[in-house]
Amino acid sequence: MKNVFRLVLCAVLLVLFVSPINLVFARAFNNDFETGDLTDWEKTGTAFDFQPTWGDNPTARNRGQPSEHQGDWWLGLAEKYQGPVKGKALGQNPGDLADGVDAPQGTLTSKEFTIIGDTMNFLMGGGNRAWGTAEPCCVNLVIDEKVERTMTGNNTETMTRREWDVSDLNGKLAKLVVIDNSSGGWGHPNFDDVHQADRNGNNIPWSRVAAVDARGKLALTWAQMKKYY
Ligand SMILES: [Ca+2]
Ligand SMILES: [Ca+2]
């Protein structure tokens, strides 16, 4: 039994020392969709089938509402253009609208993360259809299946930086859910580049959040081990 314990202890120590090294090199969280895909997020429905979208696609069709996205990739649910490589291979053209534009519906849920910041900020655009109304299009911060914060766009494709005070949620395990529950006019959200920030408004690297998440998992494993040995 003691040998088994030593083996488990070695495994835990290995995780403890190797994880931080991995966290430095690996992308901690696909918070801005710059992977060009939906890594770290899980979709339902069809609204996210051709997401994320690439470049300022509204401007590519002279919409007059620039996306103001971060990097190259963002969630623009009325858009159907996945860039000069993937999009072109799929027969998409710059400026293309999603099939049925506002018709598709669905949800996109992030992996869970620990809240360690005082605020969260992100780019938000699209329809102004609030959570709690019949056909919401929004992003929600969910803890224990309860919606703690919610945000919509302002009926424009142009995204602006929005913020939540999350100081009272510190230490909680949360997830983000992007929701498109509408097929009507302005029935889509736009979303990109989410961060946690400290009390001075400085964004916290997601690698630091991931390190806290890993320590939480380790503490849980340790507590379970102690029960058996
Ligand atoms: Ca982005
Ligand atoms: Ca929709």
Image (tube, rainbow, N blue to C red):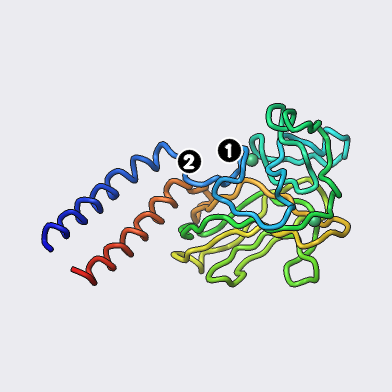
Identify the disc placed on residue 35: 1
> Left or right: 176 with respect to 69?
left
Tell me the quarter of the picture where residue 216 sits: bottom left
**The quarter of the displayed image where residue 189 is located:** bottom right
Q: Position of residue 107 (x, y in %)?
A: 68, 58
Q: Residues within 10 Å of mark 1 (few under 14, many from 20)?
A: some
User: In this rendering, would 14 be left or right of 190?
Assistant: left
The quarter holding residue 164 reads: bottom right
| Image coordinates for residue 117, horizontal then vertical, percent | 49, 57
Q: Is mark 1 within 8 Å of ligand 1?
A: no
The answer to whether the residues at label 2 and label 1 have Cβ atoms under 8 Å apart is: yes
Ligand 1's quadrant? top right
**Kind of element beneath mark 2:** loop
**Label 2 within 8 A of ligand 1 by Cβ:** no
Amino acid type, callout 1: Thr
CA–CA distance between discs 2 and 1? Answer: 9 Å
Q: Residues within 10 Å of mark 2 (few under 14, many from 20)?
A: few
Residue ID for mark 2:
27
Where does the N terminus fall, quadrant-wise? Answer: bottom left
Answer with mark 2 or mark 1, whichever residue precedes in sequence: 2
Residue appearing at x 46%, y 58% in the figure: 116
Tell me the kind of residue under disc 2.
Answer: Arg
- Label 1 element class: loop
Expressed as whole percent of the image width and height from the top left, the position of residue 181 reads 76, 62
User: Which numbered tag is attached to residue 47?
Assistant: none
In the foreground, 168 or 21: 21
User: Which residue is situated farthest in the left direction here?
Assistant: 2
